Amino acid sequence: MNLLAEEPAASATPAAILDRQGLRESSARTYARWLPIVPVRATGMVIEGADGRSYLDCLSGAGTLALGHNHPVVVEALHAVLRRGAPLHALDIATPEKDDFVSALLDVMPAELRHRSRVHFCGPSGSDAVEAAIKLTHTATGRRGLLAFTGAYHGMTLGSLAATGATGPKERVPGIAADVTRLPFPYAYRCPFGIGGAASGRLGAGYVERILDDPSAGVVSPAAMLVEPVQGEGGVIAAPDDWMREMRRITSERGIPLIVDEVQTGVGRTGAMWAIEHSGVTPDVLVLSKAIGGSLPLAVLLYSEDLDVWAPGAHTGTFRGCTLAIAAGAATLRFVAAEELPARAADVGERITASLRQLARATDCIGDVRGRGLMIGLEFVAPDSAPDVAGARPAAPALAQRVRAEALGRGLIVELGGRHDAVVRLLPPLTISDEQADSVVERLAGAIVAARRTLVAGAA
Ligand SMILES: Cc1ncc(COP(=O)(O)O)c(C=O)c1O
């Protein structure tokens, strides 16, 4: 019996598919709005559209595809599960695949986490895992406040959205974020203290410490501090290592669990297997999703045994045992470690960033080029406006959008993030070749020149 729908050729054209999507899917669509392609095949970093064009993918499923699309080790892991006839859905029941995944995960964890952690399989998205981490720390401490940072992105469910910095998605959700205390993230380029540079982190850490010790500061007694070691959606802002260590010291001294959200930074992306390795900080809770499922949906928490206070059934969920994701994730973790891809991400990331800095010096519309490993961002600014006290010119979201569109026209997929969506972000797979890296820079350079030209033409 063939259960696949056979579309008449005319209604399966890319234009017809895009039209139907516009009519039938929710108005909350995001990527689909600026990426009007219909991917039909993908290998590594290359996506083939139904229109016959090929694209270099620097979006990588919003940072999910550590090994790019359809990597042979992932595909083989999936085939092997199917060949064995293993149950594809297993709730949280023990399976050989799950047992193997936990071993693979613990094997690549820093020793302090490997030896004293519990692993909890959550619903499969990053938001689910953040939600679980918040709930766990509430239960363990009996407190309800949450310390979160400016520019943070933790997801779109109610708790994770409350912790997210962007106010736009929260404005139409009454009552959200009542218990979140917002703290300054060390964003040197747009320094929350108007000073910039290294002082940004120093001042921020001092502020955090003072506000926590001030009984009249209005801080709801915190169940946890939630932080990203590199803000991705927030505009590719890496927390300085000494600032991360300060957050660990400040929270430890006050008995506040530290939750580190490595949903986007994990699995080699920043040039270390886990971004916490740069600072040597050991969190109480580590939140993982995206790349750990090897392209498929999977999320886990790793948390200190001291926090293992949940009663049986305290945090359940139907989709916690997707065998395909678990097998693909274990294969990905082992491959990334065996091939030393974190070191490769550091090297190639540095090379791309250096070329982009050169590019920035040759134009007047890039305020900052920054990143860690293969999380790279270029912040676009208004060339003719005056800088603020810390030297940053106003964000130029329309220009960034134009760059993204020009890049797409040149077969390069990049996304935007950051304040006002003015940061062009690159999240290529860790398997990117040197030639592909050169091609990314070349296409982006062309896109920037063309976008800058339209800005001039528009002003004329
Ligand atoms: C740091 C971080 N946390 C949480 C999330 C939410 O993950 P998801 O979109 O899978 O819910 C994201 C998504 O981009 C993220 O970057």
Image (spheres, rainbow, N blue to C red):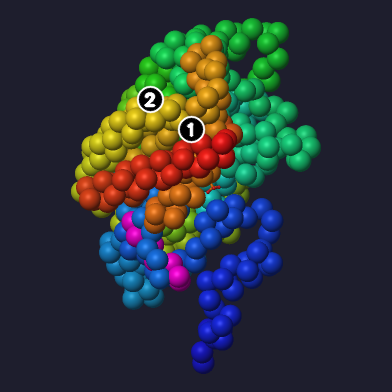
Residue span colored magenta: 45-51
Look at the numbered discs 2 and 1 and tell me whether their residues touch, using CB distance below 8 Å.
Answer: no
Asked if ligand 1 lies within 8 A of label 1, the reply is no
- Across and down, in percent, residue 190 comes to 51, 21
User: From the viewer's perspective, is 142 left or right of 345?
Assistant: right
Identify the mark at residue 36; answer none if there is no mark: none
- Across and down, in percent, residue 35 comes to 52, 56
Residue 417 visible in image: no
Residue 214 included in the magenta stretch of the image: no
Q: Residue at image x 58%, y 67%?
A: 18
Between 106 and 6, which is closer to the camera in this rendering? 6
User: From the viewer's perspective, is 219 left or right of 423?
Assistant: right
Q: Earlier in the sequence, mark 2 or mark 1?
A: 2
Q: Residue at image x 67%, y 17%?
A: 219
Which image quarter: residue 216? top right
User: From the viewer's perspective, is 221 left or right of 457?
Assistant: right
- Across and down, in percent, residue 141 comes to 60, 27
Between 306 and 109, which is closer to the camera in this rendering? 109
- Across and down, in percent, residue 416 comes to 50, 42
Q: Residues within 10 Å of mark 2 (few under 14, many from 20)?
A: many
Q: Is residue 78 above or below residue 207?
A: below
Q: Is residue 200 above or below residue 236?
A: above
Between 315 and 226, which is closer to the camera in this rendering? 226
Q: Residues within 10 Å of mark 1 (few under 14, many from 20)?
A: many
The amino acid at mark 1 is Phe
Spot the residue most to the front. 460
Identify the mark at residue 380; answer none if there is no mark: 1
How far apart marks 2 and 1 lie (CA) works out to 32 Å
The residue that label 2 is drawn on is 281
Spot the residue most to the bottom. 1
